[in-house]
Amino acid sequence: MTIRRRLLSAAALLPLSLLLGANESPSGNAPAVGSEDAGVVASSPDAGSVAMAPEDAGPGAHAGGGGPLEAQGIPGEDGGSDSEAVAAAAVQGGADGGLATLVTVPGLVPPSPVPSRLTAPPITTLRTMAKSQDLLARAKLQGERLVVKEKNGEEKVLTVDPVLQAQLTKILRDYEVPYGAAVVLEPSTGRVLALAEHSAAQPELRGLPFRAVFPAASIFKIVTGSALLEAGVSPEMEECFHGGKRRLTERHLEDSERDGACYSLAMAMGKSANVIFAKLTQKHLTAEVLRHMAARFRFNRAIDFVVPTDVSLAAVPEEGFALANTGAGFGDVYLSPLHGALVASVAANDGLWVDPVLVEPQPQPGVLLPPEEGERVLTSEAAKALTDMLETTVTHGTARGVFRERHFRVDDAVGKTGTLADRNPFRDYSWFVGFAPRDNPRVAVAALVVNDPKWRIRGTWLGREAIRLGLERVPAPIEVTAPASAAGKH
């Protein structure tokens, strides 16, 4: 391994506390297993493979999901002695241009060590948030609004819809989810409409929507898919494959005469086809490209919000099978539910990032402030293509059955599912992020459910309910048309 590669690898995996600060490093050494939309996954460093079990495709499974597979830890990159060199190069500017870029571009270097999903799942570090930071718990209902009264007499009116907040919280409590959160926001403005949460495992726990201790799983395919679009891969471009549904190995990433099935990129997004995303990552992306796209989606970067929110950490390996696996959603990448809703909002906002808002701005008499322009993450064309791909999840993919459920059907929605699992103890992380309606989005959501072996509800089901109930609370704008008698008059 060259010195340059050693430095880049260390920069991606080790803290730069002198430059960026550091959070408390998660502890724990429990081995873990993951299940990625197609099911439960176990990684073997010797065979370079990932074994998977079939996905539960039901809208809201209530039965146990079966036992996880045995797993071995994946060895980390060689970089233990490089930490001092990386930190020094970060502070001094460094002699290596690539390392200098990693340091100066926000988000390319994780601000703290990225925990191993297999050996140190960060959910074990969960602690309740401080009461002083918990604005929602301190809020009182005044009329139809939630208001926080500060000690200095200041009143903060929250953007949260009390009815929607109560509806989603009741769902989480009724199903007694071990850990669960649902975030609903207005994508064009960032106004947060719901921050529901519940933990039957730790009833005193507060702050789940802001904690990035949950594996991003296939939600990271949104980042990979965006990078592929920018690399020239169209949603219609097909990639052929053989196997890979139950076991993903390096051989599955090689083109072969055995490739008997083909998916377009859009269909691979909808069906969360891990082998397709791994092959396309290997063929079309580099670690640098994927890191840049992740940083644009605010991974490894702080989110500007009134409530302290964890940085969603993402470690992108330098090359090889590990990089391909990360592109498919198997990497050490973590996401908070609030961040998940914001990721979905990028496509809803025609490629723009809009910061979340929890406190209504104080009106100033005689002053009209124009809405702030968000930071561009994707071109308008790429955002539309990404939306087309995410729509496939609901029309032909992993969320099709849930969104067509009788009496609860939601049309014109788009989104992405994701699942992974820890082994000791067994924890199934189930995600959905998305928005609706497709062309004029009124709500964007993220839903997360962490189940034990007895599944209650899945994230996809909760996400569907968050969209359905959210649309009821945010009605479509009324189109004002001139009366027929006014035709031709000016």
Image (cartoon, grey):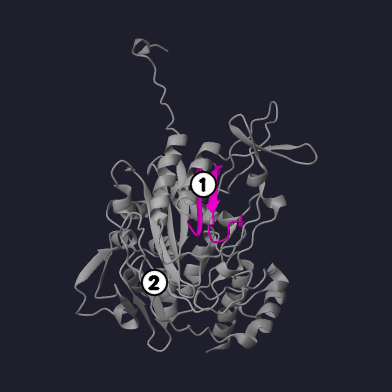
Q: Give the image location of residue 384, x and y in percent.
A: 38, 50
Circles 2 and 1 in contact, beta carbons < 8 Å: no
Residue 326 visible in the shown view: yes
Residue position marked by numbered label 1 in the rendering: 169
Q: Label 1 is placed on what type of residue?
A: Thr
Q: Is 186 or 25 nearer to us in this picture?
A: 25
Q: Give the image location of residue 173, x and y in percent.
A: 50, 50
Q: Marks 2 and 1, Cα distance to the nearest angstrom?
A: 38 Å
Q: Give the image location of residue 344, x and y in percent.
A: 46, 52
Q: Is 267 or 67 nearer to us in this picture?
A: 67
**First to last magenta residue range:** 177-206
Q: Is 157 or 322 nearer to us in this picture?
A: 157
Residue that extends furthest to the right in the rendered view of this protein = 152
Q: Is residue 86 above or below residue 155?
A: below
Q: Which mark is residue 281?
A: 2
**SS under mark 2:** helix
